[in-house]
Amino acid sequence: MNTIQTVFSIKDLENLTEIKAHTIRIWEKRYNLLEPERSDTNIRSYNLGSLRKLLNINFLNTHGFKISKIAALKESDIAVKVREMSFLGNVEKHAFNAFKLSMLNYDQSLFYNTYNQLLEEKSFREIFYEIFIPIIQDLGLLWQTHTITPAHEHFISVHIRQKILIHIERLQSLNPRPVAKTFVLFLPINETHDIGLLFLNYELISKGYHTIFLGESVPLEDLQLLNNLYTEITYVSYFTIMPTQERLSGYLDEFNKTLIKNTENSALLLGTRFRDFDAKKLPKQMKLYNSIENLVKDL
């Protein structure tokens, strides 16, 4: 069974390229840039070639090329111009679009080639903050608007996770004697989005800290044993979809009572679940952050 998405609505194109549907229609009519198929009821649909072309057009347009000039180019010449521009140092937008295409096509080679090209100009940390984080943030919108399936999300997540793990392994082989302070990284029950937490593990190890990465869906009671093994633990957790908004305050109270209260332990928390949460409600040993970058700066 072919699970690769090859047909897109104009709304899909808008979500994937960040070009308004109205603008796409104008470009079609005025410059004949795309040639959509039309249903019996006159509804537009676009193939993968149209998506790829539009991503390339958008890349050139955001780098100073006028639409009228782009429209005069052959499609093959548009791709050549994009490659030329990407080698001039403006690689982020091109890489962002290439990673999106790799996800839509389940194209591992495109993912690896794009990543390796980025590594020639950027550090792994720069790639994560400048490109991977925006991609991850985009996934939610694309999924909500039915532009991608869970399989697409899993594909790109697996490959980003793989890159983080490779860099963690390299650090661990170089730094076998971490400092005394211990960080325990875990996700609440039924929380499975671990990429942010995994990258935090990388950042902590790179600073020489001792980390214990437990990953997804860990019961609080299972962590109590760690309190018997270590005298000062900093727990780190990332709340994306769990606990539910209704359960959040109760979960944090249980967290504090089970692992923090009457100890030298502390907790660093972040994630979209805290978007509307009042940080003043937290005990002083529990601290809330609005981004991975801000948490890392505070270490």
Image: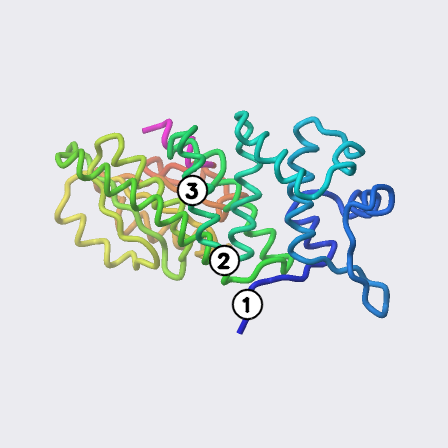
- Disc 3 crowd rating (10 Å Cα; few below 14, some 14-19, many 20+) is many
Q: Which residue is mark 3?
A: 270
Q: Give the secondary structure at mark 3.
A: strand
The amino acid marked with disc number 1 is Thr
Q: Is residue 188 magenta?
A: no
Q: Assess whether mark 2 and mark 1 are in contact (beta carbons under 8 angstroms).
A: yes
Q: CA distance from mark 1 to mark 3?
A: 34 Å
The rendered magenta stretch, by its main secondary structure, is classed as helix
Nearest to the eye among marks 1 and 3: give it: 1
Q: In the rendered structure, which segment of residues is drawn in magenta?
A: 291-299
Q: Is residue 277 left or right of residue 169?
A: right
Q: Which mark is residue 3?
A: 1
The amino acid marked with disc number 2 is Tyr
Q: Earlier in the sequence, mark 1 or mark 2?
A: 1
Q: Earlier in the sequence, mark 1 or mark 3?
A: 1
Exactly how many numbered labels are in the figure?
3
Position of residue 140 measured from the top left corner of the image (x, y, whole percent): 56, 52
Position of residue 77 measured from the top left corner of the image (x, y, whole percent): 67, 38
